Amino acid sequence: MLIEDYSLNEAFYITGITVTSVGFGVVRELSAVRRIFTTFLIIISFGTFAYAILPLQLMF
């Protein structure tokens, strides 16, 4: 936020994309609400995937 002059919303969105290794390019500019929704969708999907494969880890 301090170096690139991003808003808190933009910084949260970029962090969410980077941490979850999605890293996709944006086709068109997203509004603040769409960035927040996309970030939460990515994080929830990542958590759901981790929860789904947990039983497989315990089997081996």
Image (tube, grey):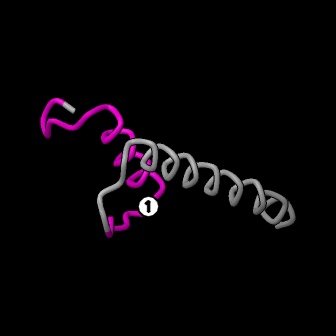
Does 13 sit left or right of 56 as displayed? left
Give percent across and percent down for residue 15.
37, 45
Does 16 sit left or right of 50 as displayed? left
User: Residue at left 69%, top 60%?
Assistant: 49
Magenta segment: 2-27
Q: Tell me the kind of residue under disc 1.
A: Ser
Q: Is residue 1 magenta?
A: no
Residue assigned mark 1? 21
| Image quadrant in which you'd find residue 24 | bottom left
Say if 12 sits above or below 17 in the image: above
Q: Is residue 18 magenta?
A: yes
User: Residue at left 48%, top 55%?
Assistant: 20
Does 53 sit left or right of 31 as displayed? right
Image quadrant in which the N terminus is located: top left
For numbered disc 1, what is the local secondary structure? loop
Give percent across and percent down for residue 8.
32, 31
| Image quadrant in which you'd find residue 10 | top left
Image quadrant in which the C terminus is located: bottom right
User: Residue at left 64%, top 57%?
Assistant: 45
Give percent across and percent down for residue 36.
47, 43
Give percent across and percent down for residue 42.
55, 55
Q: Which residue is more in the foreground, 19 or 60?
A: 19
Q: Which residue is more in the foreground, 26 or 30?
A: 30
Q: Residues within 10 Å of mark 1 (few under 14, many from 20)?
A: few
Q: Which residue is more in the foreground, 52 or 36?
A: 36
